[in-house]
Amino acid sequence: MKIAEVLHRKGTTVATIRAADTIEAAIRKLVELNLGALLVIDRWSKIVGVLSERDVVFAVSRFGTRALSFQVDAVMNHDVTSCTSEDRVDKVMGLMTVHRVRHLPVIDRGHLSGIVSIGDLVKNYLLEKEQEASVLRDMKAAQGLAETG
């Protein structure tokens, strides 16, 4: 299964926040949208990082509540790993494991196509396996009918 199929099921909407916004604003957006991460953009709308719940928790743990007034770019992950819609789900899961990230922007020909999380990939992987099992059950049932007929 390709990432394009995952995006087809989940949608292509991507929540962003500006690098100069505060962590407090980012937390509000994460909670309001029920998300685990935001794509961080600069004032020219260029992707410059990813801010995850984990990044926020580490900042608050280290700096206390004053971290809430920090700019997003002080806390975010600057090393943006991405994939394309043509990449296979298993390859992207491996990429997430190697880079220790749970969210990847999907970039096609220099343009943002969406974002996928490990949860999105696991959900679609399980759907694919469920469909494969269903086909095998149907084949077995059809074979049983052919033998009795």
Image (cartoon, rainbow, N blue to C red):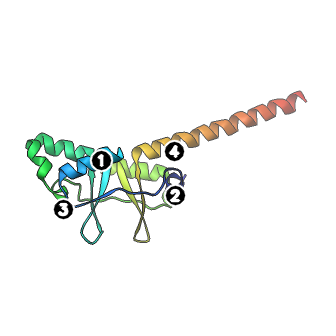
The disc, 2 or 1, on the residue closer to the chain's N-terminal end is 2
Distance from Cα at disc 1 to Cα at disc 4 = 23 Å
Pick the front one: 104 or 91: 104
CB contact under 8 Å: marks 3 and 2:
no
Amino acid on which the number 3 mark rests in the picture: Ala
Pick the front one: 143 or 4: 4
Q: Which residue is mark 2?
A: 4
The disc, 3 or 2, on the residue closer to the chain's N-terminal end is 2
Amino acid on which the number 2 mark rests in the picture: Ala
Q: Which residue is mark 4?
A: 124
Q: Name the residue: 19% across, 56% down.
A: 72
The disc, 2 or 4, on the residue closer to the chain's N-terminal end is 2
Distance from Cα at disc 4 to Cα at disc 3 = 35 Å
Amino acid on which the number 1 mark rests in the picture: Leu
> Which mark, by number, is residue 20?
3
Distance from Cα at disc 1 to Cα at disc 3 = 16 Å
Distance from Cα at disc 3 to Cα at disc 2 = 31 Å
Q: Name the residue: 63% across, 40% down.
A: 132
Distance from Cα at disc 2 to Cα at disc 4 = 11 Å
Amino acid on which the number 4 mark rests in the picture: Asn
Quadrant, the C terminus: top right
Q: Is residue 57 above or below residue 91?
A: above
Q: Nearer the viewer, mark 4 or mark 3?
A: 3
In the displayed orientation, state which residue is furthest to the right. Answer: 149
Q: Which residue is mark 1?
A: 30
Q: Name the residue: 42% across, 48% down.
A: 93
Q: Quadrant of residue 54?
A: top left
The disc, 1 or 3, on the residue closer to the chain's N-terminal end is 3
In the displayed orientation, state which residue is furthest to the top. Answer: 148
SS class of the residue under badge 2?
helix
Q: Is residue 110 above or below residue 25?
A: below
Distance from Cα at disc 2 to Cα at disc 1 = 24 Å
